[in-house]
Amino acid sequence: MILLSHGQSAGAKRLPNRGASAKIKVGVRFGFSGPVLPRHILMTQPRLDVIAIYPGSFDPITSGHLDVIERGSKMFSRVIVAILQNEAKQPLFTIAERMEMLRECLGGISGVEIGTFKGLLADYAVARNASVILRGIRAISDYEYELQMAHMNRRLRPGLETVFLPAGESFSFISSRMVKEVISLGGNIEGLVPRPVEEHLRRRIGQQKSTTAD
Ligand code: PNS
């Protein structure tokens, strides 16, 4: 991977290592020792002028989702986090509750907005002028289904590309379904979901338990 600073061409130049304060024109990290792009430069890479949709059920949003959204927001000018309205899935949280949780978790991230959709994702993407669908991949087992979806969406709307981001390594085992199961059986979910979501989950699972105990 070659990482370029603003306005540089791909002709990667090796520079003497002049320390972190040196103005590095081109940073390359590709199997040889040389200047490595400092973290703050990575953060300020220009975003692609592209609207991306990050779709899902988000019942509820997990730390893995949040990680993908944060990273996606550094790549694309706008990321629309889109909740699928599908009551057939018997969600734990209503759409309004899921939107509220997303608002609580995404407040500090620029270029991100929240939406909901029904029907085909490809149609929603076109309606929102999005040319990219963003999806996280946790393991190779996710890939097969994700690949099918990507092909289907591109068949439905040629030009609509799917970009996969590998889940952060500390999040690759997390799913909303598993988090709900663990908390409902009394397990610790600290860190698996953003803090406000943990509280919403505790309340909802507590309510469910008191209703079934009545
Ligand atoms: O949170 P999930 O379950 O991983 O999200 C799946 C989602 C919402 C991305 C997927 O079910 C979807 O896009 N549904 C919309 C219906 C659709 O467009 N189907 C055809 C393309 S596969």
Image (cartoon, rainbow, N blue to C red):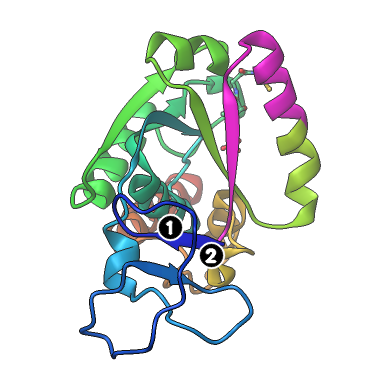
Compared with 6, 118 (above or below) is above
Magenta range is: 148-167
Residue sitting at x 25%, y 39%: 111
> Callout 2: 10 Å neighbours few (<14), some, many (20+)?
some
Q: Amino acid at mark 1?
A: Asp
Of 131 and 181, the residue lying toward us: 131
Q: Is residue 183 magenta?
A: no
Q: Amino acid at mark 2?
A: Gly
In three-dimensional space, the C-alpha distance between marks 1 and 2, rounded to whole angstroms, equals 7 Å
Q: Quadrant of ligand 1?
A: top right
The quarter of the displayed image where residue 140 is located:
bottom right
Q: Kindly identify the residue that appears in the image at 51 percent across and 34 percent down.
A: 57
Residue behind mark 1 = 67
Q: Quadrant of residue 42?
A: bottom left
Q: Nearer the viewer, residue 46 or 193?
A: 46
Q: Are marks 1 and 2 in contact (CB under 8 Å)?
A: yes
Instruction: Using the image as rendered, state which of residue 88 and residue 169 is in the foreground.
Output: 169
For image coordinates 55% across by 72% down, the residue present is 170
Q: Is residue 79 left or right of residue 119?
A: left
Label 2 sits on residue: 168
Q: What x and y, as percent, mark residue 48?
A: 37, 38
Examine the rendered structure and indicate whether residue 92 appears above or below residue 191. above
Which residue shows up at 18% across the image and 52% down it? 108
